Image (cartoon, helix red, strand yellow):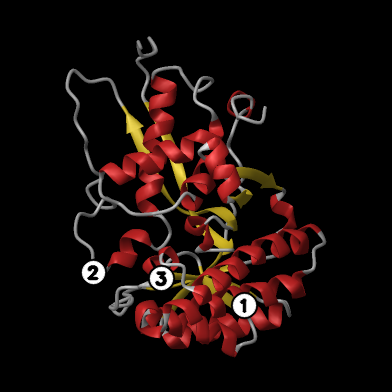
Amino acid sequence: MKPTTLVDVIEHKAYARIGLLGNPSDVYYGNTISISIANFWASVKLEPSDRLVINPHPYHDLVEFDSLNYLTGLSGSSAIVCAALNCLLDFYNVRHQVKVDERPTLILEAEKELGIVAGLQDRVAQVYGGLVFMDFSKTQMDRLGHGIYTPMDISLLPPLYLIYADNPSDSGKVHSTVRQRWLNGDEFIRSTMNEVANLAVEGRRALLEKDYAKLASLMNHNFDLRRSMFGDDALGAINLRMVEVARDTGAASKFTGSGGAVVAFCPDGPPQIELLQEACRKAGFIIQPVQVAPSFLKDLDLGSSSSA
């Protein structure tokens, strides 16, 4: 396949994501709702060259990290691969030939070759952008090789806040046994993970109805179920403290993913937001409003989906 004849520099961004509800059921044939956020991103620039050269950014592209969560908390690795894929799709002029709902699987397969173990949720959020409901049921995964991904209107979202520690030194030091227990058919893990998956279904309904009190309840329940399966030692003291600081103000809070950052929602409005901001400041945590990145897919992309 020949590349496009254009010699212009091609550059793409892929944004960080927040798992709003349903995580971590994406790797257990569940359902999730994720948000692409413009607060953080990875960018890849493709330039004409006689040689294949990968040039990391001198400041942002670190090769040494204080903890795993610096690398995975908001899905940084998948963002890099997603941005690179978008550059290659344009370079080879094949965007119309690679189905949009198959792109997350391509990204995941590339990461597997690099030794990165993960699920599809992050890659779907970064490919689609915006707000997406994802159905990873075994029936769909076996039939299609990927899930069913349904974009939602980002205006349905209430104001959300991102909380993270500048130096998450204790991000969980005990390896989780949840995956193996699930594979072994552990009844508690299986039933609890199904309950987590159903929270995304309920959350989709709550968003469509703008029932934000229900959304807050679902966010808290999502974290509580995760905690019951993984245990505090695996989750890490700093991660737990971020959730607790938010909850002490009455805000709903849960992990954005596997840890390293927390998403919070203040159902009582501005006075509660001020309390949350002050509580985070006193605890030494960074807090900022979530900037939702709208979907950046074009008609050409959407026309290539399996359901189109």
Q: Quadrant of residue 149?
A: top right
**Label 1, label 3: how far apart the Cα atoms are:** 21 Å
Q: Say whether residue 168 is visible.
A: yes
Q: Residue at x 35, y 37 (%)?
A: 44
For marks 1 and 2, give the CA distance: 30 Å
Amino acid on which the number 3 mark rests in the picture: Arg
Q: Quadrant of the C terminus?
A: top right
Q: Amino acid at mark 1?
A: His
Residue in view at x 30 percent, y 80 percent: 170
Q: Is residue 10 left or right of residue 296?
A: left
Q: Are marks 2 and 3 in contact (CB under 8 Å)?
A: no
Q: Which residue is mark 2?
A: 66
Question: Quadrant location of residue 156?
Answer: bottom right
Displayed quadrant of residue 9: top left
Q: Is residue 43 visible?
A: no
Label 2 – label 3 distance at C-alpha: 29 Å
**Disc 3 target residue:** 181
Three-letter residue code for mark 2: Asp
Q: Which residue is mark 1?
A: 221
Q: Nearer the viewer, mark 1 or mark 2?
A: 1
The local secondary structure at tag 3 comes to helix
Is the residue 207 above or below the residue 237 in the image? above
Tell me if residue 138 comes above or below residue 259 in the rendering.
above
